[in-house]
Structures are given as C-alpha cells and as structure tokens.
Amino acid sequence: MKKNQIVIILILISFLKTFSQENLKTLDDYILDHSYDIHGKEFVKIIVPGIPPEKHREPVAIPSRSAVLLNYVPAFDWSFGCSATSAAMAAGYYDNTIYPNMYTGPTNGGVMPMNNSIWGTVVINGETRSQCPLSATRNTVDGRNTRGHVDDYWISYGNADPDPYITNGWQEHTQGDCTGDFMGTNQSARGNSDGSTIFVFYVDGSPFIGTENGDGCYGLKQFYNSRGYVVNAYFSQYIYGWNGNTAGFTFNQYKQEIDNGRPVLIQVEGHTMLGYGYDDTGNLIYLHDTWDYNSHTMVWGGSYSGMLHYGVGVVDLEDTFYSPVADFQADNNAPPLNTTVSLADLSTGNPLPNNWAWNISPGTFTYVGETSASSQHPQIQFSAAGPYTVTLTVSNGESSDVETKTNYINAYDCSLISIPLSEDFSDGNLPGCWTNTDNLGNGQVWLFNKPGNRDINTTTGSNGFAILDSDYYGGGNSQDADLISPYFNLSAFSSVALTFQHHFEAYDGSWATFSYSIDGGNTWNILQTWTGSTNNPELASYDLTSQVAGQPDVAFKWNYIGSYGWWWAVDDVSITGTMPGLWTGVTSTLWTTGSNWSNGAAPTSTTNVTIPASAPNWPVYTGNLTLGTNCGNITMNGSSQLTITGSLTIAAGKALTMTGNGLLKVRGNWANNGTFQYGPGTVEFYGNSNGTVTGTIIPAFHNVVISKSSTYNLNLNVNTVVNNNFNVNPGAAFRVMNGKTLTIQ
C-alpha cells in the first residue's frame, strides 16, 4: 500500500486502515430486520452508513469513446450521508437540465453548481465535513438564517443518540429543502444514526415501492414532489442474481434508465453512489462515489473498493416540456492548423433537440470525418490562424434556441511560434501548439486545472500550472506522459536560455525528466532527471546555446513516469535568446535605438523583425515604414504592439504576420503588395491626417478601428474585407471610394 514504508507489519496495518471498517462487513451486517407485507411478501430494511475512507480513493475513470454518459451530472463529496449526497447529485442533474426547481438557493444564479466546493467545510465536534444545502441544510449556509437539517439532526458520524432538537428541546425545522430531510438521513426518530439512511428491499428481487417514512427511496420521491414534480415510478430493488433471485434489476434496465436521462442510485454493501453512465464493453457503470469530484467505474454486479453491488434505487419523473437550451463544447480551443477539432452538442430540452445547424466564422475551415453543418457532433479543421466564432442553433420540433460563443476557438499556425516565449499555463487548458503525449494510451496525461487541488508556490501559481498528478489518478494506475513545447526555428539565434519553476513530489518508482530535441522530436536528449522531491518551487535554469542555438527544429519535453506516485508540477516556462531583429524594448520605444534589440543593433533592410508577446516598451517607428527597405518581414506575437507614425508599405515578397491579438497602429497610408496575415489582431488607423488603403493585394483584416481626428478620413481605395469587428470612433470617418466595396463578415 502506498506511502507507508516502515516495516511489513505497518504496511498491513495501513492497508486495513485505508478502508473504512464498514467495508469489512457483508450485507447481512446492515440488515436491521426482516418483515412481511400484507401479501406475505418478505422484505428487509437495510441501513446504509457509508463514509469516505480516510486514506484511499478509487482510480479516476477516463471515459472511452463507447461510453454513454449523462451530461450535467454534478459530483459532490460526502455531505452528511452518502445516500443523501448521491440523491442530491441526481437532483442537481435534474436542476441543470429540465427540472429547474430542484435547487432554488442564491448560489450560481439559482442553478445547482457542478460540485459543492463553493460551500466549503465546517468543523462539528472535531469532525470536518463538506457542506451541500441540497443534501443537508444548515443555518448560515447558502443564505439560510434558521436552523436546518444539520443543526437539528447531526452530532458526529455514527452517533445514535437522540438528535439535538430532541435533547435541547427546540422546535424541529420544517422539512423541505434537502434530500436528507425526506430520506430520513441522520434522523434518530427514524432509526438512523448520523451518516445513515435506511432503504427497503423485497427479498425475491422484485421492486419495493415504499409508502411510509423510513424508506430512503420513498423519501426521495417525496423530495421531488415537494419541488412541484410528479413521480411516475420509484422503487428500490436487488440486482438480478443477488442471493440467487431471478426477478432483480438488470444491466439492460440500468442502461435504459441512462438512455432515458435518469441517473440511478447504486447500492453497494454499506454505501450509496450515483450511476450516470455505462459502457457495454465490460458491463461498466460510470459513477460518482461521494468521496471526491471525479468520475469512477465499476463492473455491474461486481464490487467497489471491496463492497459488493447488490441493489439500485430508481425514480422516474414525469416528463415536462422544456424549451431547448443550446450548448456545446470543443475538445480543443487552441488547435494547430489542419488538426481535427470535435464539437460536442451539450444542448438540453424535453424533448431533446433533433435538429442542429452550426455556423462558424470566418469560413476558413472544413468539415471532416463525414460530418457537416447539420451534424450533432461535427468535426472540423481550420486552414487559417486566428479566432473563430461558433454558433449552434438547435430545435426539437416545438421551439429552438441559439448559442453563440465569440472567438471561442483560436487556431494557431505553429510554424510562426518563436522565442522569446513565456508560458504560465493560466488558461486551464493545453496551450496552443503544445503537445500532451500519452505514452501508455490510458488517458492519464498532463492537466492544467488543479485536478488534485495541489498548490505550487510560484509567482503565477495561483492562476494555474501544468501538472501530472499520479496520486490524483489513484491506485492501480500508471502514467508515462510528455508535455512538449512548440517546435522552434532557432537557426537565426546565437544564444538560447530556458528557465522554469517546478515541484516534483517523488515516490518510489516515479521520476521526472527534462529533455530537448533538435530534429523535430525524432530523438530526445536528456538535460536533467529528478528522482527525489524538490523544493516547492524549485528553479530550473539552463544555458542551451551550445545545444540548440542555430538549429531549425527545436522542442523541449517534460516527461513524468509513475505508478500511484505523487506528482510533477511545472510553471512559468521562459525561453529567451539573442538574434538580429528581436525586439526587447529594454531602453525605450524607439525603433532605431540599438539597445532595444536583442543583438544590440537596429534592423536593416534584410533583418526579419520579431516583436514578442511581452516587452517593457512597445516599438514606435517614426516616419514611413516599408518592409523590404527598412526591415525584412515582421512577426508580431501574442498581444504585442507596433506603432507607425507615417505610412506602412508591405513590399512584394514580404510579409507582416500577427500571430495573436496584437495591435498595429498606422497614422498614414496602408499599401499591401505582399502578404498580411492578420490572425486575431487589430489594425488601428489613427491621428490627425488622412489615410488611404491601397495595394495590389485585396486587404483583409480581423479587427479594424478608425480613431482619426475629426475632419480626417480613411479612404478605402481598394476592395476591403473585415472578418470580425469594424469600429469607427466618435468624430472619425471613412469613405469607400466609387466602385469599391467594404465587406464586414
């Protein structure tokens, strides 16, 4: 067992302590009594006291392509009872889909959040407990100002004494706002100790339909009724084959519930979980186990963390018409050009939408994988760099809805990526032109959203970092994954330096390796390997001049290997170098000052210019700037800026490229006889002089701003295309000359 390394005896003791003592019991230990209904049919009352084990979490599940999953199912960690918490996750799912009255509190605009972390924890009688007002209300939580479920019923886990409202003689709160109230969870008057809920099952495997307080499934039905919804059916039932029965609930019936949009309570010995998906391959259930915010799996009819699966709880709500709400998600918001991006339809409604119409702007993309603009889940590839706005219109035959996500996808031309590069992994996703390589093919790769709630004490650690968290992926899992930088053409660089901050938390059999390649990733050269834990953080710094300067196809790789180890977190990667035409701006804004350039000299007619994504000062070129005369090509990276106080001419054979959302300001004329790649950038025509747009190449822009002083115009002497925003500031003016067109799309 992990993380106990003293002697064999202690390891055995640790193993026994890893699991709750409840897990050593069988179902018979949880049966309170046997009884018979009025028809002589035997039933049993089963108490479910499950609580998260102190030192163990099950492996995180990475859904396969064949998995069928319900969307918008929250994952809550244990909040005053596993059964009430699982029921609250089901109610939260319905609240996020077609039954919006399940949660009506003030948080998240009245829509149940996808986890309960926003309500934090509370310490009661020395125990730290997570809070969730949908499973167990409490005074001062979620705007409540009177006693609730926790105040009236909770003492400490497993306590079977009379509840606080009884011993203290105060009035019991009016039940009605949480699943635990109706399910009898924690309530001594209903025979439940703290943390427990009772469910009733027919011994022969047929469905049990409770009609009195004390049965958890009947209580969940009452909760749904209290929210204004009609319940068509509800029951607890043994699974087929339990104790040899032939009438029990089957895997096919479970699949039908999921296919019909209904999550299912999964009962294992001593514990309740929520099933929200399945995979026919292996008869897998996808579930949330109330122990964390992750997805997990188990085999239908198998065991979960040593607890055998014996039953289910099913509730079927009456359908209500619900107008469709369009929503979607891309699997990559920062794709390289000509790579496939999948758009997943996440729309809701009752009935569900059955018609989809996608619109993506600009139109420099193609549908692939035999998909089209009317596919539910289209696949697309982009042929031009820059931001793309995606719109989805859905309808279900009754009504329709439209969702537009402006600049939702930003496609990258990775051939334009250069240094200096600074990456702090603040977007929560893999950065554009970086690669996440899964060498084992199990989906356990680098993540950027703090999956295990680790902290790295770097300057920018609070806004995110890259981490391969082996501990997060859980026991029984192994990882071998690479985080690879973009590929750089460093043939013009005379020096290169790289730094990053990191925290490697070591465990036996885990190690971290940093490498470089000069042949496009065909071979890798190790710079450093870590097998012992580092400081948090530790600075890694390298002068790589002799290794990579002058090389045309360079990349850097962070590789982690481990099996239920700890983690490697990486942040604040900085790659810098020296070459002609690389702006540093360390002295001033003056283009002609040599100390503003990395090699100490201002550009000449043949010098290709790179303006990085960050600099202390942005360059200002005084006068008229002609590419091919005053410099070679110009590349503006990221949010860089360039101001030209005169006119700009792009000569034939020359190129000005904006790779990010930078700003190019031109006071005079614009003449494009070469190539202008606008990316997601903005061109601003400013100042107190007239300007014209001319050239042999039809100019195309992403964003245009006209901010010229009053009485001065921008004259469009050629056909002009603007692919996003065209803004004219108050007092400014423009003219489209006779016979010419301005197209804004």
Image (tube, rainbow, N blue to C red):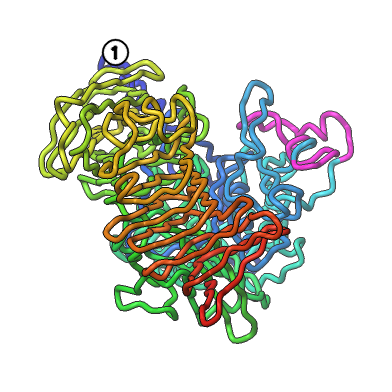
User: Which residue, as the protein is rendered here, is positioned at the far bottom?
Assistant: 397
Q: Along the line of sight, which residue is nearer the eye, 261 or 362?
A: 362
Res 378 seen here: yes
Q: State left or right for residue 69 relative to residue 527.
A: right
Residue 522 occupies quadrant: top left
Q: What is the x, y in percent for residue 78?
A: 57, 40
Q: What is the x, y in percent for residue 58?
A: 39, 40
Identified at 27% across, 25% down, the residue is 497
- Secondary structure under the numbered disc 1 in the rendered image: loop
Q: Give the overall secondary structure of the magenta segment.
A: loop
Residue denoted by label 1: 6
What are the residue bounds of the magenta stretch? 142-171
Q: Along the line of sight, which residue is nearer the eye, 692 or 405?
A: 692
Identified at 85% across, 39% down, the residue is 146
Residue 560 occupies quadrant: top left
Considering only vertical position in the picture, is 546 above or below 150?
A: above
Q: Residues within 10 Å of mark 1 (few under 14, many from 20)?
A: few
Considering only vertical position in the picture, is 591 above or below 509?
A: below
Q: The residue under label 1 is which amino acid type?
A: Ile
